[in-house]
């Protein structure tokens, strides 16, 4: 029997794909990059920290034998994105995929935030995704590069909202709206646009910021997931590689949730009844039936 954390697609599934992964030097971006390389893609990884990117590039090309290019780029600045794209095209010939994965986030009561703090998250997540999407879209349309694909990494609170991470929720909701809007508008140019909404996948970047210190034990995310575990990186990489590949050529404008049922658990009116022990149900049933009589 196959295991859920095994690589899923067949060899060469991403051959001919040259993909930019923003925030590709660490966390989920690094995991996706590794699998894209294993499947034959060439990958450009970008973030603010060139040293980290170069280390990751060296590690992943050694591991997979694939071609990975490290380019510094702060996605908040459109001119840096354009420059990065220019370099990427020069080195790889063309680019036909984009994963908007770079993000910034921290927990805080909203009223404690300075205007600059709020802006910082909006700028990385919403403006950063817009910058990369706009630069790539203009290039693809002008040069008639197709098929090409955008994949945005959002979160489930893009549609539910979430207290204490309001700038991130606001920005991710914008990215989700952009995903669906461009799926329609740019389909005529051969550009697909999709999103993934992950639940908790342990990474240093997200978890040390969102669950610092003893919060990790207090709010163990696995406890509020119906499947009773957090996600494994390969599961997310499988989904991302599928959506970037031509196997998903008819999937456009979709957001796929991969969270073990987490957000629905929080949403269903009576989901908390799960805490009722089995032996109590006989008594409850009797009580309810007696009322009817
Ligand atoms: C309140 C804070 C703060 C905090 C920073 N600020 N941290 N305010 N609480 N914890 C304020 C600062 O005081 C400053 O405002 C403004 O935010 C900018 O801070 P800088 O440190 O100057 O910003 P910068 O160096 O650009 O760093 C950006 C960052 C940082 C977002 C603050 O955390 C970062 O680099 N993050 C990148 C990686 C990341 O966050 N990964 C997590 C992704 S997880 P003032 O007014 O003082 O100038 C995710 C979803 C997970 O996205 C969902 C899980 C289910
Ligand atoms: P992470 O390791 O902190 O990744 C964020 C990446 O973004 C880092 O590589 C960072 O690199 C880069 N980045 C931040 N600001 C940037 C900027 N201004 N310009 C360019 N790059 C920038 O966190 P992660 O957990 O892997 O998160 C990856 C994605 O998954 C994010 O979109 C996040 O919202 C989403 N997500 C994660 C989880 C989870 O449980 N892990 C759940 C839901 C959604 P530098 O610091 O080098 O710039």
Image (tube, rainbow, N blue to C red):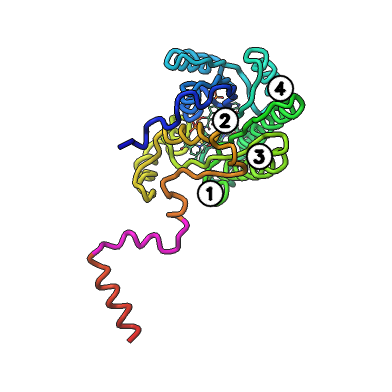
Q: Earlier in the sequence, mark 4 or mark 3?
A: 4
Q: Which circle marks residue 102 in the picture?
A: 2
Classify mark 3 as within 8 Å of ligand 1 or not, answering yes or no.
yes
Residue located beneath label 1 in the image? 162
Q: Secondary structure at mark 4?
A: helix
Compared to residue 153, the image places residue 159 above or below, namely below
Was residue 281 drawn as part of the magenta stretch in this picture? no
Give, as a single range, the part of the protein colored magenta. Answer: 267-278
Marks 2,3: beta carbons within 8 A: no
Q: CA distance from mark 2 to mark 4?
A: 16 Å
Disc 1 to disc 2, how far (Cα)? 19 Å
Residue contact at pointers 4 and 3, CB within 8 angstroms:
no
Q: Under tag 2, what secondary structure?
A: loop
Find disc 3 in the rendering and name its residue.
Answer: 115
Tell me the tag on residue 82. Answer: 4
**Residue 45 visible within the image:** no
């Amino acid at each position: 029997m196959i295991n859920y954390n095994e690589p899923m697609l067949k060899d060469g599934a991403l051959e001919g794909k040259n993909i930019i992964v923003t925030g590709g030097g660490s966390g989920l971006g690094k995991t996706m990059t590794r699998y894209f390389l294993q499947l034959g893609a060439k990958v450009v990884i970008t973030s603010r920290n060139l040293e980290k990117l170069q280390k990751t590039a060296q590690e992943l090309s050694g591991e997979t034998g694939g071609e990975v290019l490290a380019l510094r780029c702060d996605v908040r600045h459109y001119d840096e994105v354009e420059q990065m794209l220019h370099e990427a095209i020069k080195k790889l010939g063309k680019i036909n995929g984009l994963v908007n994965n770079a993000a910034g986030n921290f927990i805080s009561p909203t009223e404690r935030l300075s205007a600059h703090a709020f802006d910082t998250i909006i700028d990385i997540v919403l403006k950063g995704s817009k910058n990369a999407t706009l630069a790539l879209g203009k290039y693809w349309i002008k040069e008639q590069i197709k098929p090409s694909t955008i994949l945005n990494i959002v979160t489930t609170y893009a549609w539910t909202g979430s207290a204490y991470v309001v700038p991130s929720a606001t920005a991710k909701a914008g990215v989700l709206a952009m995903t669906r809007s461009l799926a329609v508008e740019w389909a005529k140019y051969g550009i697909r646009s999709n999103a993934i909404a992950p639940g908790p996948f342990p990474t240093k970047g997200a978890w040390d910021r969102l669950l610092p210190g003893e919060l990790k034990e207090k709010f163990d995310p696995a406890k509020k997931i119906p499947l009773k575990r957090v996600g494994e990186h390969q599961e997310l990489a499988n989904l991302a590689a599928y959506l970037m590949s031509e196997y998903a050529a008819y999937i456009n404008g979709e957001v796929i949730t991969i969270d073990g049922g987490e957000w629905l658990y929080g949403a269903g009116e009576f989901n908390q009844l799960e805490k009722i022990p089995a032996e109590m149900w006989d008594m409850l049933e009797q009580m309810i039936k007696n009322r009817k009589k």
